[in-house]
Image (cartoon, rainbow, N blue to C red):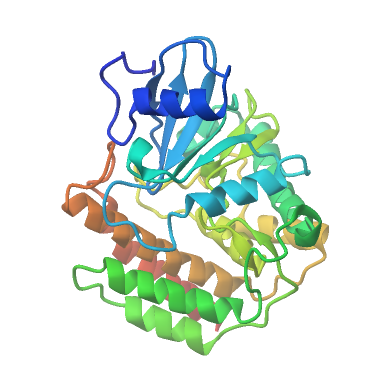
Amino acid sequence: MSPAPAGAAPRGLDPERLRARLDRDLPGLLCGPLRGRLIEGGRSNLTYEVTDGASRWVVRRPPLGHVLATAHDMRREHRVIAALHGTAVPVPEPLLLCEDESVLGAPFYVMEFVEGVPYRSAERLAALGPERTRSLVLGLVDTLVDLHAVDPGAVGLEDFGRPEGFLERQLRRWGRQLEASRGRELPGIDELRGALARTLPGSPAATVVHGDFRLDNVLVGEDGGDVRAVLDWEMSTLGDPLTDLGLLVMYSTDLGLGDSPVSTTSSAPGHPSPAELVERYAARSGRDAGAIGWYTAFAWFKLAVILEGIHRRYTLGQTVGGGFDRIGELVPVFVEHGLTTLDEEG
């Protein structure tokens, strides 16, 4: 998709105001007027590609309307990317954080544009063939291991979160998010939340966690090469690393829904099974992943809450882009998967 023509900027982006701020804070970066387009695929914070005709950059900002206090913190997202840039974890180089809401109507940051492919469907992944698909997904696990091997203190993130009591706080946080976003009856979701609270596992040593780690949130080299950039750090913190693994396992489970607005690539030929992903992570990280069922059920719960928030914004006309009309019907599916996973764990 080509950038929108001048004068047809997407909602949430003002190219003229953005250019003025970049000219002020990063003089010499731009060589002409900016044009921009919304990058489709995100369901929470908004991501835009902007260009001056010669170079490209990426702008991240919160969604329009109904912004939950802790879920769309641009300063936090910018900080973790800046800290990880230069480590074994591939991230775009951050260029500017702007908290002046007069520019775009909300805080935002600008980072480099990384060339790469986001594999968001089993059909697209299948085009790589079984061998490259397997290698890519196992490489994604290796990238997660690299992230969890970063010493937070060595990169200035020693105070990025409060690891003690992490899982309890996560459940409380997502419970509050649920109450802030819920606008209809959701059978089973309170049962799932209660069951998770009763069966909390003990956490391993804390690491930097991504919070939304999946194939959909990385850019990959052409033809399924290496992971070039890990994106969407809005939920990152210091905490239990197995929450990242549980989420990756969840996204590697077939939803059985066919064409779905929530990405799962598990049906692509050659895709490793959830058990293989857990085995590789445990072998490479040295962590005990025996309680992965709880972490996977928690991932189902968390995604159900996130989807319900998106569904509410859609019903209020506060979403940008397409693909939101079916989000609401997925929430009960995620709740049911969470309950089933906990039953199997028990």
**In this rendering, does residue 138 appear at all?**
no
The residue positioned 46% from the left and 34% from the top of the image is 59
**Residue toward you, 201 or 271:** 201
Q: Residue furthest front?
A: 24
**In this rendering, does residue 265 appear at all?**
yes
* Total numbered circles: 0
Q: Image check: 202 left or right of 37?
A: right
Q: Image check: 117 left or right of 335?
A: right
In the rendered image, residue 32, in percent from the top left (x then y), is placed at: 46, 10
The quarter of the rendered structure image containing the N terminus is top left
In the rendered image, residue 282, in percent from the top left (x then y), is placed at: 76, 63
Dividing the picture into quadrants, the one containing residue 294 is: bottom right
Q: Eyeballing the image, is 20 above or below 269?
A: above
In the rendered image, residue 188, in percent from the top left (x then y), is placed at: 31, 77
The residue positioned 74% from the left and 48% from the top of the image is 142
The residue positioned 60% from the left and 76% from the top of the image is 166
Q: Image check: 125 left or right of 314?
A: right
In the rendered image, residue 232, in percent from the top left (x then y), is placed at: 52, 46
The residue positioned 31% from the left and 60% from the top of the image is 309
Dividing the picture into quadrants, the one containing residue 322 is: top left
**Residue toward you, 268 or 186:** 186
The quarter of the rendered structure image containing the C terminus is bottom right
